[in-house]
Image (tube, rainbow, N blue to C red):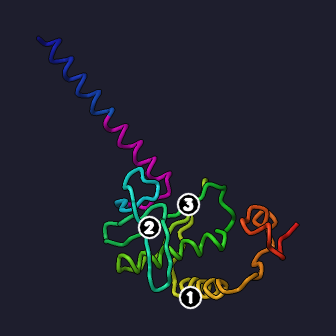
């Protein structure tokens, strides 16, 4: 009888240790993911919260699917954009503006302005403040893009040959590089 009780105690202790290990590992995986603390309320991966519709703002004609939206304990919503490449010294301007677009969409769809968003590269994360200046830069870019819709051959806005090489308009662009 004593052996049976000892066996149950050993099993209970083993299960408690396994649970503790699993909890610590889950915390480590969450931390490594670059996601802030909180509840995931939107995921473009479809793995956790399948989304059938992207975020949309009719005023700007802007549509987007952030990789994640995390709702923090205080109700703040933080957009998170994952990038598969190695982190640059500073986030690329295009990535920052993409994240700003997600911040604008969160504000329009959920009715609250994010204080920041996160750009998570393979090896490093950047918290990007969603300032009035960044919003102004985004809105200026959206205006420029809207104007370029009516131009037959808009001017190239970069000097990156890799970007040109993968551009779907390369075949008929008069300003292509290389």
Q: Position of residue 16 (x, y in %)?
A: 27, 33
| 47 up-or-down from 69: above or below | above
Towards the viewer: 153 or 128: 153
Relative horizontal placement of residue 163, taking residue 79 as reference (left or right): right
The numbered mark at residue 2 is: none
Which of pointers 1 and 3 lies earlier in the amino acid sequence? 3
Q: Residues within 10 Å of mark 3 (few under 14, many from 20)?
A: many
In the image, farthest residue toward the left: 1
Disc 1 vs disc 3: which is toward the camera? 1
State whether residue 41 is above or below residue 129.
Answer: above
Q: Residue at x 60, y 85 (%)?
A: 146
Frontmost of labels 2 and 3 is 2
Structural distance between the alpha carbons of marks 2 and 3: 20 Å
Q: Are marks 1 and 2 in contact (CB under 8 Å)?
A: no
Q: Position of residue 150 (x, y in %)?
A: 66, 86
Circle 3 residue: 120
Mark closer to the chain start, 1 or 2 = 2
Relative image position of residue 48 (x, y in whole percent): 38, 52
SS at badge 1: helix
The quarter in which the C terminus is drawn is bottom right
Q: How many marks?
A: 3
What residue is drawn where x is 57% and y is 82%? 138
Q: Is residue 51 left or right of residue 159?
A: left
Mark 2 highlights which residue?
54
Q: Provide the secondary structure element on which disc 3 rests.
A: strand
Task: Tell me the residue that label 1 is attached to.
Answer: 136
Q: Quadrant of the N terminus?
A: top left
Bounds of the magenta segment: 19-37
Q: CA distance from mark 1 to mark 2?
A: 23 Å
Please state the horizontal and vertical placement of residue 51, each as a whole percent of the image.
39, 60
């Amino acid at each position: 009888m004593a052996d049976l009780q000892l066996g149950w105690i050993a099993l209970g202790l083993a299960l408690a240790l396994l649970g503790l290990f699993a909890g610590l590992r889950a915390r480590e995986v969450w931390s490594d993911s670059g996601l802030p603390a909180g509840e995931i309320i939107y995921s473009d991966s479809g793995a956790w919260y399948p989304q059938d519709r992207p975020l949309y703002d009719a005023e700007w004609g802007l549509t987007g699917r952030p990789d994640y939206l995390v709702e923090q304990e205080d109700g703040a919503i933080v957009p998170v954009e994952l990038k598969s490449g190695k982190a640059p010294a500073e986030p690329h301007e295009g990535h920052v503006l993409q994240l700003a677009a997600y911040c604008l969409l969160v504000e329009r769809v959920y009715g609250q302005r994010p204080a920041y968003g996160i750009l998570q590269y393979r090896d490093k994360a950047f918290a990007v403040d969603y300032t009035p200046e960044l919003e102004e830069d985004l809105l200026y870019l959206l205006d420029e893009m809207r104007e370029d819709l009516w131009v037959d051959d808009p001017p190239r806005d970069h000097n990156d040959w890799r970007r040109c090489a993968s551009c779907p308009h390369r075949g008929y662009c008069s300003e292509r590089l290389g």
